Amino acid sequence: MGAGVALVAAAGLAGAAQVSAAPTLPTSSVAPTLSARISGHSFTLTGDRSFPSNRVTVTLHAVGNERTLEILRFKGSYTLSDLHADLIYFFKHGGENGKPTHAAIRHLDHAIGHVAFYGGADAAAGKTATETVVLPAGKYTFLDDSGNLPKRPRIVHVSANPTGVAAPAPSTQAMQTMKTDRRFGGPTSLPATGTISIVNHSTESPHQLFLQHVKKGTTRKQVERSFRSQSRPSFILNGSVGADVLGKGKSQTLQYSVPKGTYAEFCFFPDPKTGLPHAFMGMVRIVHLS
C-alpha cells in the first residue's frame, strides 16, 4: 500500500531529450491469496509466497483442534529465537499465572518493541476463518500461534508495489475497534456469518479479538471471574472465532461462520505495563451474533 509512482520514460533523439507520456496505472489489483492448514503435526502454507505489496487474503483451516495463525515482521536483527527467549522468560517468571515480575515485564516489552503484529485468525476445530490485511514491502513470518510459543515459521517476501495500487477491501457488515482504555468499541450486534473489520486504535499496546459462544444471559462479570477458574465455566457453548494479535494502528478483516447467539468478546494479550492479560483488566464485552 505504497504511494502512487509516476512513471516517466525518456529517450535521447539527435542529442535532445524527449519525455514520453506516463502509462495509465490500473485502478484495481487482485489480492494475493494464501491457504494455511494447521494440525497437531503440521503447518502448510500454500500459495505464492513472494508478491508485490498488496491486500493479502489468508484462509486458516483448523484441523483436529482450535488453531491460531499469526502474521508478524521482526524489526532489525531481532529473530524468532529472540522472541521465544523473551516469552519463555516472561512465562517462567510469573506471566503464566498473571503475576509477572518486573524483569518479566521488561522481557515482554522488549518483545513488543521488536515485533510488528499484522493480525491473524483463530478457528475452532474443523472450521475456517479468513483474514485480509495490507502487507507493505518486507519479510513476514507466518506462525502457528496455537500455544504459548509461536512455532513453525513460514516466510513470505513482499516487494515494493510498482503501481502503488492495492486490491479493494472486502465489504464488511460491522467494525470492531480496540481502544487505549483496554476496551472494545463498535456495535454489539454482529453477523454470525459474514465479514467484519477490526482496527486497533490503541496508542499503547497490541490487542487481539476473540469471540466465544456463551449461554444467553451470561454477564461480563461472570466472564471476567471465569478467567481465574481452574475448570471450564458452565456458560461456555460450542462456537468460537477470532483474530490474532494486531499491532497499534493496524487493521484487518475477518470472515467467518459460527452459531448464532450470545458471545463474549475479549483480549488475552498481556499488558505492557502490568503483564496481566487485558481480559483480566476488563477488556471483555458481551455481543450478539445473528
Image: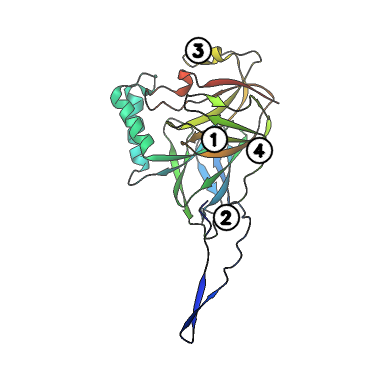
- Decide which of 62, 23 is in the foreground and name it: 23
Residue type at tag 4: Thr
- Does 247 sit left or right of 122 as displayed? left
- In the rendered view, tell whether residue 262 sits above or below residue 46: above
Mark 1 / mark 2, whichever is N-terminal: 2
Q: Nearer the viewer, mark 3 or mark 4?
A: 4
Mark 4 / mark 2, whichever is N-terminal: 2
Mark 4 residue element: loop
- Does 150 sit left or right of 7 as displayed? left
Mark 2 / mark 3, whichever is N-terminal: 2
Most distant residue in the left direction: 103
| Residue hosting label 1 | 199
How crowded pointer 2 is (Cα within 10 Å; few <14, some 14-19, many 20+) is rated as many
Residue type at tag 3: Arg
Quadrant of res 198: top right
Residue 225's tag is 3
Q: Is residue 125 visible?
A: no
- Decide which of 202, 141 is in the foreground and name it: 202
Q: Is residue 257 visible?
A: yes
Q: How far is mark 3 from mark 4, CA to CA? A: 33 Å
- Does 199 sit left or right of 141 as displayed? right
Mark 2 residue element: loop
| Residue hosting label 2 | 165
- In the rendered view, tell whether residue 174 sits above or below residue 23: above
Q: How far is mark 4 from mark 2, CA to CA? A: 20 Å
